[in-house]
Image: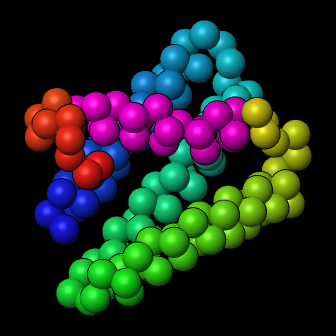
């Protein structure tokens, strides 16, 4: 469980610094029209990490089967959160930059790969994560 908490902390930090860096880069390169989509997508990722952390914290002392079901249900939560965020963005904003939004949503994937490599280098390549 401690490894999972550490994973959530690291992913949140990676995502925060990546979000700020790309936002500043978009500003400097004069692509301000994409900042809202980028921030919206990364915001969905932050919400998901928060929900996932709270969800796992709630079942931390349960049976492994309960934890497994909770983790699988996390996929449905993420899908629902993305769908709700997309619908909300479509209704709230005119000319919403959906491409930047999708890139912001997918930002977690390369960051999670980086974290997996870091973890495996530290704990050995035969580890579970």
Point 76% across, 56% down: residue: 86
Q: Say whether residue 116 is magenta.
A: yes
109 sits left or right of 9 in the view: right
Quarter of the image for residue 52 reads bottom left
123 sits left or right of 23 in the view: left
Q: Say whether residue 111 is magenta.
A: yes
Q: Position of residue 108 (x, y in %)?
A: 48, 42
Say whether residue 106 is visible: yes
Q: Position of residue 57 (x, y in %)?
A: 28, 78
Q: What residue occupies the far top of the structure in this picture? A: 29
The stretch of residues the image draws in magenta is: 100-118
Quarter of the image for residue 77 reads bottom right
Figure check: 71 above or below 89: below
Q: Position of residue 115 (x, y in %)?
A: 30, 37
67 sits left or right of 97 in the view: left
Q: Nearer the viewer, residue 27 or 103?
A: 103
Point 64% across, 34% down: residue: 103
56 sits left or right of 52 in the view: left
Point 82% across, 50% down: residue: 93
């Amino acid at each position: 469980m401690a490894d999972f908490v550490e994973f959530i902390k690291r992913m949140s930090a990676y995502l925060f610094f990546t979000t700020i860096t790309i936002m500043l880069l978009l500003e400097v390169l004069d692509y301000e029209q994409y900042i809202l989509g980028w921030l919206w997508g990364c915001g969905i990722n932050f919400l998901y990490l928060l929900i996932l952390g709270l969800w796992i914290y709630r079942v931390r002392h349960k049976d492994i089967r309960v934890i497994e079901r909770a983790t699988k249900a996390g996929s449905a939560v993420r899908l629902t959160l993305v769908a709700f965020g997309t619908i909300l963005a479509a209704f709230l904003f005119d000319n919403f930059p959906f491409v930047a939004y999708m890139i912001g949503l997918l930002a977690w994937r390369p960051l999670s790969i980086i974290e997996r490599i870091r973890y495996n280098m530290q704990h050995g390549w035969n580890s579970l994560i």
